[in-house]
Image: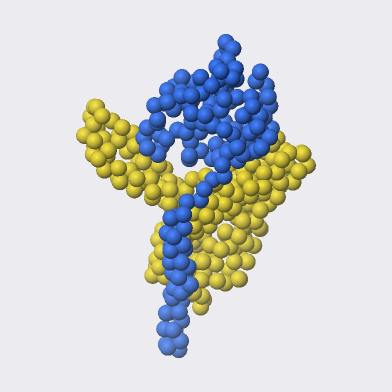
Amino acid sequence: MARTDLWDRFSQRALPVWLPVAAVVLIVARVISSRYEVKSPVDLVRWVLPRAAEQMARAAHKPILYEFGAEWCGPCHVMEEEVFRDAELAKMINDKFVPVKLVDTRRETGKNLPEVATLESRFGVRAFPTVVVVLQAEGAPRTMVGYPGKAEFETFLRGIP
Amino acid sequence: MSATVILETLRRHFAHIAYVAAGLLIVIIAATMAAVDAPAGSTFQVFSLFMIIAGCQIIGPEFSSGTLQLILSKPIHRSRYLLSRVAGVVLALWIAIALAYTADVAARAIGGHDIAWRVGGGAAVSIAAEAVLLVSLMALFGAFTRSYMNVALYLGGQILLSMVAGVLQMMQRMERGAFSAFGAFLRAHPGVVNTIRTIDQNLYPDAPRIPFDRNWLLLVFSNAAIALLLACVIFRRREVPYGAD
């Protein structure tokens, strides 16, 4: 009786062998895998550098489309997948606008690139994603804060002259 | 693992009015959001609270109610019991996620909207992986506390880490004023802020940037395995009190 009791007690408190093995295997896989960064698919939109955008827009008589986002921003990546990697919408953006992508890095590095900081301040960007379209003609820029979904975003873009 | 404990955990969830009501609510939210063509994967943003409520009952409340003392008087492996409870809760959450995703896809198909399989599927897989980590952490925090202290530790840790990281980042930028010396120290030693941010990202990871990101999934699963291992190590040594609190 006493022997069975002891065995049961030991057995009851034993650790399953597979658990530490699984933990070690996963940690090793994680370390090896982290050496090979998973590359995101390339956007089909032909982004332009901010400093070149105004000159290009004047020459082509096109509005500038600024897209403000951040690495940590989930909806920004959904928008990338659904809009900027969609062949039809990307073609429309390339044809109709001078597109500029601006990534906010304050959370990661504590500061932004000067051109990002200047444009965020100029358009009062407070949330991500924010899309600002600056028209060639006089008038206030058209702004969309947040990502409302593919269909509504397409309507927003098509509504710009 | 014990199929009996897993099935009993599932039964407890499916027989609980709160689980059924929350599950139905999530399915309705998913279908409604999909019907208005909300961004793919946005349905799963409502899951965090549901996962916390489901995960918090793993082991702590059983200590306090005296149920655990009764269960462990039977010849059952402590680790096997704990892991089976974790598996049961994770399965209950995965079923809710699968239902929400099905509702999302069905509503998009009926409404004639695009079904973004890659983005939506990626979000479903991410939230399913997050469920494993969250429930494992709840098991770990519950292994050395009582009642619902595991939720308090989980939420407290989340708030504290993000707050400390934010404050330190703010101080890092200070070049003048009362905290300028501390700011200079943080700028000279960026490892301090990076360490806190890394701990935060390991325990409470943001959703992955890329759908089905292999590195993100390995981070979540390896951390869950470590949490479960620690939970089992602590739980096997813990004295279980007689009777209820």
Q: Chain A shown in which color? A: blue
Quadrant assignment, res B197: top left
In the rendered image, residue B94, in percent from the top left (x then y), is placed at: 61, 56
Residue sitting nearer the eye, B219 or B178: B219
For the N terminus of chain A, the image quarter is: bottom left
Above-or-below relation of B212 to B228: above
- Judged from this view, the residue extending furthest toward the top is A138
**Split into 4 quadrants, where in the image is the C terminus of chain A?**
top right
Q: A124 or A136, which is in the foreground?
A: A136
Query: Percent position (x, y) of residue B165?
Result: 36, 41
Q: How many numbered markers are drawn?
A: 0
The structure residue drawn at horizontal position 40% and vertical position 42%, both measured from the top left corner, is B162
In the picture as drawn, the residue positioned furthest to the left comes out as B181
| The furthest residue to the front | A59
Q: Identify which residue is drawn at 74% across, 43% down.
A: B107
Quarter of image, res B179? top left
Residue B80 visible in the shown view: yes
Residue A21 sits in quarter = bottom left
Q: In the image, is residue B24 above or below residue B38?
A: below
Q: Position of residue B211 (x, y in %)?
A: 57, 48
Q: Which of the two residues, B202 or A10, is positioned nearer the viewer here? A: B202
Q: In this orientation, does residue B219 appear? A: no
Colouring: by chain
Please name the residue shown 56% across and 28% down the image: A99
Relative vertical location of residue B186 with respect to residue B238 in this rendering, above or below: above
Q: x and y percent of residue A24 in the render?
A: 43, 66
Position of A27 with respect to B178 (left or right) is: right
**What is the letter of the yellow chain?**
B
